[in-house]
């Protein structure tokens, strides 16, 4: 099923969802930047001293205390994002390097299939009994195929699998999904990201199937290939989770006009919405009354006393 611009429906939906994921990440980092800007004059010169004194220094300005909490949340999320990004990348690299130690030359039906799809320079064959193929690499992605897959498939099934993986390669999916997964794992106060990322992964698989169908594969060969790899280990950390969405992919192959079934928890949507509203209010609200420097100066350099009779604040 395609739309008027020629892009498969799943690909359009996946692209839109990826933009939404990156947009959410962009908004969160913008809030972090705004908070850091507000705190910059005090934060930059004496980071440790700032962290130790700010809580007490802003006792009168409750709004700034809330903003400090928001800063902590956003900084921890940014750090968690970088850590998860590094962890996923390191794990993928480790497993791929282990597999590539068993690299083999390819010939026969695999050679014919890669030549037909113009993938000769982008495919690695490794000796492994499990039948699977995956796309790996971020700036220069490649396709990895096991000898178990080549042995289990006939030539048409093998071409279908490679056409599917070619989509992931041309779309730079390993890089996109590395970012999406790290964002999902880091921003725990926005739980709907888990649903959005899972839907994105599934849409990319369906889009890759649609790409394979548009380049010579048939529904029968794709479904047959899926069945043959269904019981193999899930090498989720290595590529794009190619065979984790087996049931949904088979349903879309059997019913090409079937609408995509979005898996969204409305409770997670509600929690995420409330969390972002509270975070935005905590960050943006203090910008209106006075500058942070003025608030710090007032709190730190004057002693505030309360006149009970006039309910006013005087300075000594």
Image (cartoon, rainbow, N blue to C red):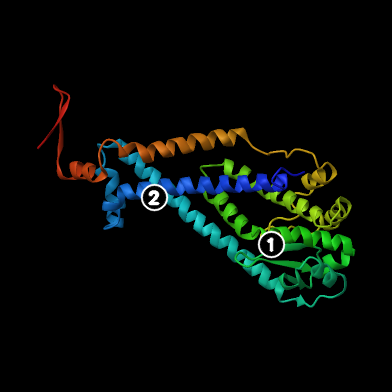
In the image, which disc is placed on residue 127? none
Q: Which residue is mark 1?
A: 169
Residue 104 appears in which quarter of the rendering?
A: bottom right
Can the viewer see residue 199? no
Mark 2: few/some/many CA within 10 Å (<14, 14-19, 20+)? some
174, above or below 58, in the image: below
Mark 1: few/some/many CA within 10 Å (<14, 14-19, 20+)? many
Residue 121 appears in which quarter of the rendering?
A: bottom right
Q: Which residue is mark 2?
A: 33
Q: Is residue 208 left or right of residue 180?
A: right
Q: Residue at x 51, y 59 (%)?
A: 83
Q: Position of residue 14 (x, y in %)?
A: 66, 47
Foreground residue among 245 and 109: 109
Labels 1 and 2: the sequence-earlier one: 2
Element marked by disc 2: helix
Q: Position of residue 276 (x, y in %)?
A: 47, 38
Q: Residue at x 26, y 44 (%)?
A: 292
Can the viewer see residue 222? yes
Q: CA distance from mark 1 to mark 2?
A: 34 Å
Foreground residue among 271 and 199: 199
Q: Quadrant of the C terminus?
A: top left
Foreground residue among 21 and 64: 21
Q: Quadrant of the N terminus?
A: top right
Element marked by disc 1: helix
Q: Position of residue 46 (x, y in %)?
A: 27, 57
């Amino acid at each position: 099923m395609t739309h008027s611009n020629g892009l498969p429906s799943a690909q359009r939906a996946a692209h839109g969802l990826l933009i939404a994921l990156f947009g959410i990440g962009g908004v969160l980092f913008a809030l972090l930047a705004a908070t850091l800007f507000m705190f910059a004059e005090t934060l930059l010169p004496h980071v440790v001293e700032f962290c130790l004194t700010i809580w007490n220094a802003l006792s009168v300005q409750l709004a700034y205390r809330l903003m400090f909490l928001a800063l902590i949340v956003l900084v921890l999320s940014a750090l968690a994002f970088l850590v998860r990004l590094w962890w996923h990348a390191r794990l993928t690299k480790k497993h791929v390097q282990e597999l590539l130690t068993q690299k083999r030359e390819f010939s026969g039906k695999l050679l014919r299939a890669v030549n037909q799809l113009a993938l000769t320079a982008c495919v690695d064959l490794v000796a492994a009994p499990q039948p699977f193929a995956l796309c790996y690499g971020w700036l220069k992605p490649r396709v990895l195929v096991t000898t178990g897959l080549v042995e289990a498939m006939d030539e048409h099934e093998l071409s279908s699998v490679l056409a599917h993986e070619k989509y992931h390669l041309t779309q730079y999916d390993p890089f996109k999904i590395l970012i999406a997964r790290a964002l999902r794992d880091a921003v725990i106060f926005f739980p709907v990201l888990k649903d959005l990322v899972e839907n994105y992964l599934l849409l990319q698989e369906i889009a890759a199937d649609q790409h394979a169908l548009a380049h010579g594969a048939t529904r029968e060969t794709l479904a047959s290939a899926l069945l043959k790899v269904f019981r193999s280990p899930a090498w989720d950390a290595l590529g794009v989770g190619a065979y984790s969405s087996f049931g949904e992919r088979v349903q879309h192959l059997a019913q090409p006009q079937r609408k995509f079934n979005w898996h969204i928890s409305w409770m997670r949507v509600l929690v995420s919405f409330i969390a972002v509203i509270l975070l935005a209010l905590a960050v943006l609200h203090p910008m209106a009354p006075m500058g942070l420097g003025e608030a710090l100066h007032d709190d730190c350099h004057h002693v505030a006393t309360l006149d009970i009779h006039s309910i006013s604040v005087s300075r000594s």
